[in-house]
Each structure stands twice: as structure tokens, then as C-alpha cells.
Image: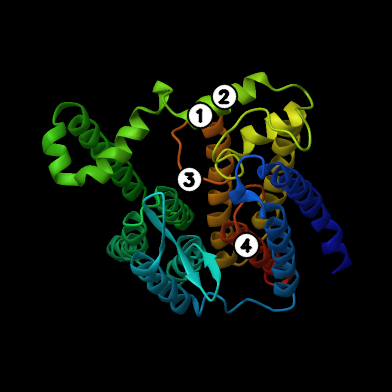
Amino acid sequence: MKKVLNKQLILFIPLLILNIISLFNMSNAKLISDVYNDALLKQIIWFVLGYLIIFLLQKFKLKKVFKYSSYFYFLTIFLLILVLFLGADTNGAKCWLNLFGFSFQPSELAKLSLALYLTHLATNAKIKNIKAEFFLIIKLFIITLIPSILVFLEPDTGAIINFLIILFVILIMLKLNKWWYITGFSLIILIGTIFIIGYFYFQDFFIKIIGTSLFYRMDRIINFANGNSYQLENALITIGATSLMGVGLGKILLYIPEAPTDFFFAFTLGNYGLISGIIIIIAFIIIDFYLIHLVNNFKNNSFKIFSYTYLGILFFHQIYNISMNLGLLPIMGIPLPFLSYGGTNTLINYLFLGIILNFQNIKEY
């Protein structure tokens, strides 16, 4: 046990460094807007709760966590339906549910429940032939489609991508017949081609079919490189104008509305310089390689598949958020793990970590 704890320091030291950088930024966040006046205190509470979650999860053996995953999945489906009717409307989207004085995003909870449930279905399926593979793929797809549709109605494009990543990782890990992967890849190309042709050549007809909401989202993605985003322009100016050490505590280089959340990386560079960006990237690399090494040693297939779904989400968030801040990818609500302001996303990340570290303590790993 002592040996395991010593090894886990390789994970917790860079994780703690990310948390400290986040707290320094939350101290500066109040200069962005009064909305963030309590950001520092709240972020401290969420980090403390996150580490408490990891500590408490080590007290249990979660071998049966997959057995009850269906109940957890249907609970989150209920919450996703509830948020459409009772959710708080923020900037035209209903993503937050207020219960007993607490606000949280059911779509974040759905990431965990979907990963657990799909892993359970995939690892317990009896795949004897290509027909059985077909029915399993359809089943996994439908289970993923239900929360995706509900989240699309909020709307929350980032959450849908997370769900698809979970499904994609599980299908890859199952090592099905190669023709399923060829067929799936071909369908993605075909659907993408139809959307692009419809967007450029048949816009009026296209809008009638998919609706103005989806068309607007496509339009924003396709035209993101035009540089007409106030936030992106300020983020790029901030990155370009920063020094090695930044402006420091109690100052901001330039106003970015969503600086503590989606544009955390640019905000950090402006506040604490290029050195802070290098530290963030190195910390992520250490965390990523630690988790990859850990998960590769798991003997239990369920443990391994579930853990890789989280690794897929983690890699995506790191790469997409930083690329988005650099103007390389379209702007979406993709937070930077363990850094961006937000309680639900932070706690779900720690829940994933806690479960994976719990698997390490089970003899079967």
C-alpha cells in the first residue's frame, strides 16, 4: 500500500500544481466580472471535495460498480429530462439544474454514468459471430444516442462530443471485425460530405430539414477562422502580448469574458506568462503518461475499458481547449480539466480519477 501511495505522488504533485495555478487565476477572475467574486472560495471547496472523493473511494472495493451502472444511467437520463423543463436558462441554454440550493450540470454526470454502463454492456456481451457484433453495436449506439439527443436540446455540443468519444473508445477496445470500423468510418465521411454540400449549395432547403439552431452551430464551426469572435481575438492578443512572467497577481492583461472557464489557458498566459503555459503542458504530460502506464497494467477488461474512456475524454479536453485558445479549433464549451472554473466538471474529473485509482487497489488489476 505504501508503495502504491509513493507511486501516486507522481500523479498528485502535477495535479496539485494545476490546482494552484487555477486558484491564482480565480483570484484574478473577479477583475473580469462580479460574477466571479466568489470564484476563488468556490474553487477551493471543489478541489477539497475532489480530493476527499478520491480518499473516500479508496476505502471501498468498486468491483461491483458496473453491476449497478444501469440504475445510475437511467437516473442521469431522468435528470437530463428534468433540466429541459426546470433548468436555469443561461445565454439561451438550459444546462444547469438547481436542487436544494446547489447548481450542477446533469450532462457532466452523464459522462460518468454512460462510461460505466457502456463498459458493463460491452464486457458482458457474448460476441460469437458478426450478427452478435451488429446487435451489440446497435445497442451501444442507442444507449449513447438517448443522452445525446437530450443534451442537444439544451444545447450542449461539448457534452455530445464527450459521449461519442466514450462510445468510440469502447468500440475500438472491443476489437470487432475490421469491416465494422471501415463501415463506420465511411458513414462518417458520407454524412459529413452531405452536411457540407447542404451547407454550401442548398442552404434554404438544409435549414428546413435541420432547423436554424443546428444550422447556426454548423455555421459557427465552419466560419470560426474568420476571426469575428471578440473572445478569440482578445485571447490571441493576450497570448501574443504576454511576457515570460505575465502581469502577475491582481492584474489582467486584457478582458476576456469567459476567461476563467473556456479561455483559461489564454487567461493564464496573460496573468502569469509563458512559463505558466509550459508548466501546465508539462503537468498534463506527466498525468497522462502516469495514467496510461497505470491502465495498461490492469488485468480486468472492464477496468481497462472504463479507464480508457476517461483517458479519451481527458486527452480531448486538453488538446481541444488549448487549440481553441490558440484559434486552431472552433469555440465550444470545452473546459480545461482541473483548471477551469466549474464545480460539476471538476468533481466528475475527480470521480473518474478516484474510481481508476480504486481499481489499482483491487488485486485483479
In this rendering, the answer to whether 154 lies above or below 364 is above
Residue bearing the label numbered 3: 333
Residue highlighted by disc 1: 232
Q: Nearer the viewer, residue 335 or 36?
A: 36
- Asked if labels 2 and 1 touch by Cβ distance under 8 angstroms, the answer is yes
**Left or right: 117 as drawn, with respect to 246:** left
Numbered disc 4: secondary structure: helix
Q: Quadrant of residue 317?
A: top right
- Nearer-N-terminus badge (2/4): 2
Residue at position x 73%, y 27% in the image: 274
x and y percentages locating residue 281 in the rendered image: 69, 36
Q: Position of residue 332 (x, y in %)?
A: 45, 41
Cα distance between the residues tagged 2 and 4: 30 Å
Residue receiving disc 2: 236
CA gap between label 3 and label 4 equals 17 Å
Please tell me which of labels 3 and 4 falls first in the chain.
Answer: 3
- For the C terminus, which image quadrant? bottom right
Contact (Cβ within 8 Å) of mark 3 with mark 4: no
Amino acid type, residue under disc 2 in the picture: Leu
Q: Disc 4 vs disc 1: which is toward the camera?
A: 1
Toward which corner of the image does residue 3 lie, by quadrant?
A: bottom right
Q: Amino acid at mark 3?
A: Gly
Q: Which residue is mark 4?
A: 347
Marks 4 and 1, the one that precedes in the sequence: 1
The disc, 3 or 1, on the residue closer to the chain's N-terminal end is 1
